[in-house]
Image: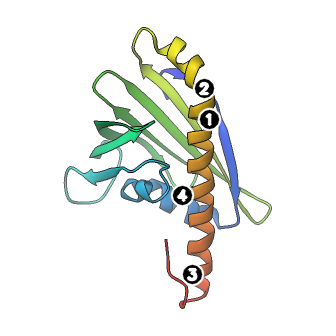
Amino acid sequence: MRGKPGPVSQIHANVPTEWAYAYVADLTRHPEWSPEAMMIAPESDGPVGVGSRFSAEGGLFSRRGRSKVTITALEPPAQIEFEVEGATTITGHVFTFSSYGGGTTITRQPFGIKQPLLSPVTGLVSRGAMNKNVVGALAKLRANLELGMQSARRPDLPVG
């Protein structure tokens, strides 16, 4: 991934690696585990692959914005990369998946590709809130994965 690497975050989910990868690689499901309300939709029909683009609308700290999301790499079931281009920024996201202890370790790392001049200062000021946002999203991701796995084993439980 190009750009300046950001902080690495990790969770462990008690689900198979293929299950975790498939859920995260389906970008239309990201709103299910986003800490803020968002929507994302493919810009074209057909199979998703490298170069697939999505229109997104969401927020960070209650500031709404539109963006374009492009998948830049898919390596099932090990890694997915995508870039989010907003009005003034481009941020890359890399998710990696590895089997560990009967489940999956999911690692997330952002990359600052195009950032406003004052971005480093803003990042320092809001680092705690941003970390809370990422940690919350990953905790929700783990809960959704594990609930989905339980539902798959027990048809009487709802998925999602």
- Toward the left, the furthest residue is 44
Q: Residue 77: horizontal and vertical position, in percent?
A: 55, 56
Q: Secondary structure at mark 2?
A: helix
Above or below residue 150? Residue 88 is above
Above or below 2: residue 23:
below
Query: Which of marks 4 and 2 precedes in the sequence?
Result: 4
Mark sitting on residue 127: 2
Q: What residue is disc 1 on?
A: 131
Disc 1 and disc 3 in contact, CB within 8 angstroms: no
Disc 1/disc 3 C-alpha distance (Å):
30 Å
The numbered mark, 4 or 3, whose residue comes first in the sequence reads: 4
Asked if marks 1 and 2 touch (Cβ < 8 Å), the reply is yes
Residue 71 in view: no
Separation of residues labelled 4 and 1 (CA atoms) = 22 Å
Residue at screen point 32% across, 52% down: 39
The reply to whether callout 4 and callout 3 are in contact (CB within 8 Å) is no
Which one is in front, 155 or 137? 137
Left of 59 or right of it: where is 68? Answer: left
Real-space CA distance between mark 4 and mark 3, rounded to the nearest whole angstrom:
17 Å
Q: Which mark is residue 144?
A: none
Q: Is residue 71 left or right of residue 10?
A: left
Residue 67 higher or lower than 143, as above or below: above
